[in-house]
């Protein structure tokens, strides 16, 4: 490495994330020429790259040294250029037609995304890349963002985007010191808990965190055909169901997110159990939910003036019998679905995932000889468990990109085929404030035959139509 090379070691929480990219498409309802905002977007990105200089860098495995454990780091040089916005040009699809259909990810051509490879080989993997394109009718624009998941999570990427938007709006933005040193920040905040765990064995840590395992997942002999589809659930329907369940909630507040996740879990389990062959054999299904740990570490840990943009993702794990889930219907068995909601709420309760439990996960990675030997503790391939990530509170629709762009009209991940994965998309809260029935959007990834059965489920059809 040259003398002007900077290195940012990635934290144990970063190492737990899959080697992939978080991808977000933000669309804008605009006919303004690209010249009216391209320079402003690039200027804002240049300023953002000075605040978060590793955006200019690449992710590498650490150089092997005697006795050192494998890890990852970001490297960039003082002379590194800011990421450049790539103009993809126009696509054949029109904004009017795709927006009328809900901007389904399956309708978007794959070439709109920047070409990036998350594999951290000899040349490293880019931390960040961005592109933009025009729709064929010149009534909309798409901004595609890719962020290496070992560097940050969706909340961290949103903080970077928010800073980018602010940098675009200010003619003379304040000079801020680079936001580096993530490992030191985490260890300082978790120091007391980490010290108390010094004598805790690796076996004890794995026993305390069944969401992780030392056993690699059992790979199927062949993979089924999977599908990916976006669904919209009117918020008014979720609120109506919540009112019906209040008397069974035993004093606990049922949040929109908890209730939506319970209904997703129950409906998908019913669909899976209706499959004519290869039905899930296990009697218990587990729901895995990603939890942002920033506030759990300390309410003051990540603030606008001192954002923490590394990964702080923890996993909440709850289990319910497939029989209870399949028989759950808010009309026929409100008590049962309320019980599912309570199981979900308990799994991510502050007393369950707190600074102590986060320090335990941090220690688990540190005490493991090789972080690549840590695997998910749930079933990835046998259509039994379900993983839900919620972007609902990212508030990306509230960001104003300024003249010529305005606020994003849609936020979409790419079309991705998988089995048992859901993403709840960012809420449009301004719509709700204007007394228009807001719809909660969720991207569902399932086996293709299970997706067809899900769409035949009476309760799911009532919920989404």
Image: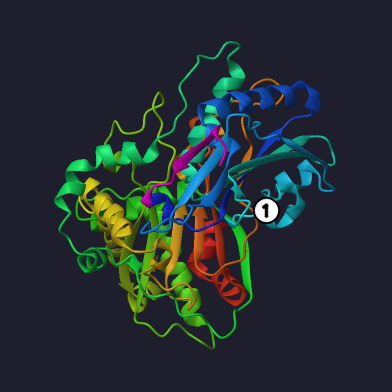
The boundaries of the magenta stretch are 1-12
Quadrant in the rendering for residue 186: top left
Q: Does the magenta segment cover residue 312?
A: no
| Residue 407 vertical placement versus 449 (above, below) | above
Which quadrant: the N terminus?
A: top right
> Which residue lies at the image location 48% right of the left edge and 76% below the top edge?
383
112 relative to 213, above or below: above
> Tag 1: Cα neighbours inside 10 Å, few (<14), some, or many (≥20)?
many
The C terminus appears in which quarter of the rendering? Answer: bottom right
The extreme top residue here reads 172
In the image: residue 219, left or right of residue 248: right
Q: Position of residue 135 (x, y in %)?
A: 80, 41
Is residue 199 in view from this perspective?
A: yes
Res 353 visible = no
Q: Would you say 361 lies left or right of 226 here?
A: left
Which residue is at the front of the view, 252 or 34?
A: 34
Q: Quadrant of residue 402?
A: top right
Given residues 6 and 227, the one toward you in this image is 6
Magenta span has 8? Answer: yes
- How are the colours assigned in the image? rainbow
Q: Position of residue 101 (x, y in %)?
A: 70, 50
**Residue name at image x 39 percent, y 63 percent:** 370
Q: How many marks?
A: 1
Between residue 464 and residue 364, name the one nearer to us: 364
Does residue 379 appear to the left or right of 436 in the view shown?
A: left
| Quadrant of res 303 | top left
- Secondary structure state at the residue bearing disc 1: loop
Question: For mark 1, what is the residue?
Answer: 104
Residue 288, given in percent of the width and then of the height, sits at: 38, 62
């Amino acid at each position: 490495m040259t003398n002007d090379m900077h290195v940012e070691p990635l934290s144990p929480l970063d190492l737990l994330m899959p080697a992939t990219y978080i991808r977000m498409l933000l669309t804008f309802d605009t006919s303004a020429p690209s010249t009216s905002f391209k320079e402003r977007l690039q200027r804002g990105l240049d300023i953002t790259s000075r605040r978060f200089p590793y955006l200019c860098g690449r992710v590498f495995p650490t150089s092997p040294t005697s006795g050192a454990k494998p890890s990852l780091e970001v490297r960039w040089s003082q002379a590194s250029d800011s990421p450049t916005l790539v103009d993809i040009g126009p696509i054949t699809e029109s904004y009017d037609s795709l927006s009328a259909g809900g901007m389904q990810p399956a309708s978007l051509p794959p070439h709109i995304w920047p070409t990036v490879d998350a594999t951290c080989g000899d040349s490293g993997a880019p931390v960040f890349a961005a592109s933009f394109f025009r729709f064929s009718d010149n009534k909309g624009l798409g901004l595609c963002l890719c962020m290496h998941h070992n560097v940050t999570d969706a909340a961290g990427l949103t903080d970077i985007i928010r800073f980018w938007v602010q940098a675009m709006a200010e003619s003379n933005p304040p000079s801020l010191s680079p936001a580096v040193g993530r490992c030191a920040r985490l260890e300082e905040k978790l120091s007391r808990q980490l010290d108390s765990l010094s004598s805790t064995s690796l076996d004890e840590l794995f026993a305390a965190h069944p969401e992780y395992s030392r056993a690699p997942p059992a790979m199927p002999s062949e993979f089924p055909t999977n599908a990916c589809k976006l669904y919209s659930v009117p918020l008014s329907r979720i609120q109506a169901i919540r009112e019906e369940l209040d008397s069974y909630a035993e004093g606990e507040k049922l949040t929109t997110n908890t209730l939506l996740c319970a209904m997703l879990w129950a409906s998908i389990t019913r669909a899976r159990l209706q499959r004519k062959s290869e039905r899930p054999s296990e009697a218990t299904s587990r729901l895995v939910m990603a939890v942002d740990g920033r506030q759990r570490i300390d309410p003051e840990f990540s603030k606008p003036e001192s954002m923490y943009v590394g990964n702080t993702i923890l996993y909440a794990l709850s289990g319910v019998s497939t029989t209870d889930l399949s028989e759950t219907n808010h009309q026929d068995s409100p008590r049962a679905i309320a019980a599912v909601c309570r199981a979900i709420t308990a799994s991510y309760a502050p007393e369950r995932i707190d600074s102590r439990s986060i320090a335990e996960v941090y220690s688990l990675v540190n005490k493991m000889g090789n972080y690549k030997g840590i695997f998910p503790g749930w079933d990835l391939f046998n259509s039994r468990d379900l993983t839900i990530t919620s972007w609902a509170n990212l508030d990306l629709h509230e960001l104003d990109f300024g003249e010529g762009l305005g606020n994003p009209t849609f936020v979409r991940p790419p079309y991705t085929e998988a089995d048992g994965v859901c993403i709840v998309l960012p809420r449009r809260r301004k719509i709700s404030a204007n007394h228009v029935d807001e719809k909660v959007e969720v991207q569902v990834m399932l086996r293709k035959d299970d997706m067809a059965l899900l769409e035949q489920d009476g309760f799911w059809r009532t919920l989404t139509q």
